[in-house]
Amino acid sequence: MKASVIKGVLVGSTLGVALGVGAFTFGYAKGWSYLTNNPAACANCHIMNEQYDAWHKGSHRSVATCNDCHTPHSLIPKYLVKAENGFWHSFYFTTGLHPDPIQAREVSVRIAEKNCRRCHAEVVDQIDSRAVHGRELDCIRCHRDVGHPNR
Amino acid sequence: LMNVMERKEEGRNPFFRVVELTDDTEDPSIWGKNFPLQYDDYLKTSDQSRTRFGGSEALPKTPSEADPRSIVAQSRLEEDERLKRMWAGYAFSTDFREDRGHAYMLDDQTYTERQQVSKQPGTCLHCHASVYVAYRKAGDGDLIKGFEAMNQKTFADARKEVTHPVACIDCHDSETLALRITRPGFLEGIRALKAHQGIADYDVNRDATRQEMRSYVCAQCHVEYYFKGTEKRLVYPWANGVKVEEILAYYDEVKHKDWVHAETGAPALKAQHPEFELWSQGIHARSGVACADCHMPYKRVGAHKISDHHVRSPLLNVQKACQTCHHWPEEELKGRAVAIQDRTFRMRNLAMDALMDLVDDLSAARAAGVSTNDPSLLMGQDYQRKAQFYLDFIEAENSMGFHAPQESVRILGESIDFSRKGQNAMRTLVTPKSVAAVP
Amino acid sequence: LMNVMERKEEGRNPFFRVVELTDDTEDPSIWGKNFPLQYDDYLKTSDQSRTRFGGSEALPKTPSEADPRSIVAQSRLEEDERLKRMWAGYAFSTDFREDRGHAYMLDDQTYTERQQVSKQPGTCLHCHASVYVAYRKAGDGDLIKGFEAMNQKTFADARKEVTHPVACIDCHDSETLALRITRPGFLEGIRALKAHQGIADYDVNRDATRQEMRSYVCAQCHVEYYFKGTEKRLVYPWANGVKVEEILAYYDEVKHKDWVHAETGAPALKAQHPEFELWSQGIHARSGVACADCHMPYKRVGAHKISDHHVRSPLLNVQKACQTCHHWPEEELKGRAVAIQDRTFRMRNLAMDALMDLVDDLSAARAAGVSTNDPSLLMGQDYQRKAQFYLDFIEAENSMGFHAPQESVRILGESIDFSRKGQNAMRTLVTPKSVAAVP
Ligand SMILES: [Ca+2]
Ligand SMILES: [Ca+2]
């Protein structure tokens, strides 16, 4: 089964197969609740449980949901990213072809950091203000665990 | 598409018990019926692939009467001739190979040339076969009695009593599947160590935490050891602690030597795979990271996380072995491990050169007719014993320093000091007259 | 919406500018009007408290004409007499103290006894005073010209041109407050290093990332150095790289020696505070952890986070310096650092003993009248030069191995090898006759 998926993916029609699979899973795995802000929505995928559980133990539990950190916060892009994430998540989840342990992609880290600044702009004003382009302060270098500790 | 439903299924289901397992079920294929995932991985320990310093190479070999193996791991003696000289007069100088997967442990022990050049006792099997059932049988139900009985036998006789390399029952309780220590050597060794640390009457199977057990099951075998007395009892030399100087102190106290060095007459010691001892001195142990965390990392199979029973070099499996804790790219993590190993390897070679120089001097002095009880010669020999044990402690350890980077280099540095001091002890300072004599 | 605009404003300029700062504003108290929080912490570098190997002790001292200081840090020479012998014939054997906070840098340099026993050039001030403005003045606006001019002066004359210890302007651009390198020694040193790494025409203020700058500002001074030629130019010996062997190779190439050892006649080298060089070899540097991350960690003051300008031992501030990255209890983190330092200290002492033995032999041989160009003696002296530089590289480095634990012990191990080989080079093997001669 897995083998055939891999083959399917490798052999030409990646998009076709992927989309098909994606679409199906998306519906099946309560894909629609994915568009809400409820962290439980993310945990629809057991594969998100690790972060979900950790988030409950984390310092942001009461102040930030998954989406507060993982989706951009001007309305339109938010749903684009969700669709994009949603697509990949569904696809990976279905095929099981994702890295294990899961690693945040560069783009996700950048989105998260924008969100750190969104809420903590005042706190980091002084340390962040002289950030010349390409020289921004990298929050996650020191605060990797704020969202969901114990990793 | 099945996939997602399977996953939801798996989410709920634990494994099915197909067969009953008892404390006498030795054959892993039977356990495999209940736990096919772990069994499949367990079988993979027959894979052979290399890393810079670990893994192993699969070298073809023409089977012979004495040694039917058609594939062996590379010879460490050929990789570094100096090893032969370090072990001159000892079985290891005839055959010493890179270690490989668990699947080979019984054959590699049975057919190593070391068996031909010297009579080995049944004790050997303690760490190369599934002996738990055999021990209890030999002791009419008493593990320790059986252990003692098997130790007394010749290797050949004892060998007949066992069939499998390390198997499920050697690490697991057949009912609960909880980890369990089955090896008398470790049961007694860890008790002695804890006693030294002020903890009386330590029973590992009663007192150890689960996380400790994830290392202790490995420490049943991946440790320094010696055979005590004529009864050839397997003993782990930890009564003073597990640091190299504490182990050497123990051997000096009990006046143990493994052999007399053929070239120099030094009462020499051979260190063997002190993985547990070295790891104990490292930052990972201090951080509570167990052998199994790196060598049997969790892997996701559907909703389950199972322990990868393909025990092997973590550098062949960096993603699961390291990236759970270290968010660095795979190549970077390999690079870090190799940087530590390269530094250790460099010092290991300097220590080896120093030792060879000392052996040169001792041989030359003997050749020149310096009497065997000459104080300077005796001093030189004692320094050789020390230098050699320290060097071998890292040489025989199998992570090339990774398990405790700073401690490894510390030990090699002290080995260098011993070798060079040994040379000095046998030399006299130049004088205006003696000058000519200097190279 | 208003809100966002405010933010944008603040973003560009989150401080109330009470006074205008220019490229000539040297006095930190003026900067302090705009940045009172940083200034207050900056002043705290006059605090003195000890850790096991760091910080400093405040020892009362009766002020004298030559040395008006009423408090000094403990003498390292008294802590370990062997240091005097290692530096026999060099100014360091008269006075060498534990380093203390930035507030003292100018006084400690001005009044150290080392100033009395030997004439020092103006170059010294490069790292002990706020010289940026003075350099530009002396060079009519040209930093490098001014640097060269000041180097040529006597220390006494140059000293008149400066007033403050390292100040804001030495690390910051007065307009943007961005970090900026102001030290010619580093501007040229890092360029040479990058060139060696294949990066041509490196301009640190143009090409370095912000994170790199968080270490480079410190590396302006916390590095190994020497004075080149009669013009006493300050040079960082990095043309072959920053590893100890690469720096030694450089000194051998340019045939540099700091002094001739009084007891042995060896052409000796003195290593000095190679914090940047050693840190570069460690796991923290490899992980992108900068000096400022540990020595100037962020702290929250009111609504803002700022960099703690009380530059000091992180072990006096573990919570902020370590615990954001390492979620271990404070005591445990201290314990880890000290464990690394104790191991380094042990090896440092073994290396020191080995060196002393070599010095004994060299002296004895010279006393016995072995000719000064005797090959064995020359060999012994060259080994002393090597052994001593390696040992001093860790001895003079101020983290007692913490900045690169394995590398530190590697270097000390090689130092031991050099010392002992030096002894061997001057000794002849025992013969049946010579036996009596041995201790
Ligand atoms: Ca191997
Ligand atoms: Ca200090």
Image: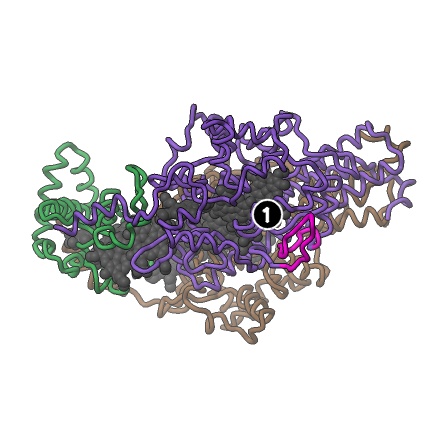
Chain colours: A green, B brown, C purple
Residue carrying label 1 = C107
Provide the chain ID for the residue under circle 1. Answer: C
Could you tell whether C288 is left or right of C275 in the image? left
Secondary structure beneath disc 1? helix
- Residue C105's place in the image compared with C157, above or below, is below
Q: Taking C112 as reference, is C305 above or below it?
A: below
Q: Position of residue A145 (x, y in %)?
A: 31, 56
Please indicate, yes or no, whether residue C175 appears anywhere in the rendered image.
yes
Amino acid type assigned to the residue bearing label 1 in the image: Asp
- Label 1 crowd bin: few (<14), some (14–19), many (20+), radius 10 Å: some
Quadrant including the C terminus of chain B? top right
Can residue B46 be seen here? The reply is: no
* Above or below: residue A61 compared with residue C9: below
* Outermost top residue: C200
- Asked if residue B190 is among those painted magenta in the image, a careful observer would answer no
Identify which residue, B187 or A68, lies in the foreground.
A68
Residue in the picture at 34% in, 46% down: C19
Residue C296 spot, x, y in % from top left:
43, 51
Nearer to the camera, C203 or B151? C203
Q: Residue at coordinates 52% horizontally, 58% vertically from top-left?
A: C47
Answer with the quarter of the image where residue B196 lies: bottom right
**Magenta segment main secondary structure:** loop
Q: Nearest the camera: C429 or B223?
A: C429
In this picture, residue C353 sits left or right of residue C54: right
- Residue A29 lies left or right of residue B219; in this view the side is left
Residue beneath the point at 42% across and 64% down: B211
Q: Along the line of sight, which residue is nearer the eye, C14 or B349?
A: C14
- Give x and y (percent) for residue B369: 87, 40
Which residues lie in the magenta part?
C59-78
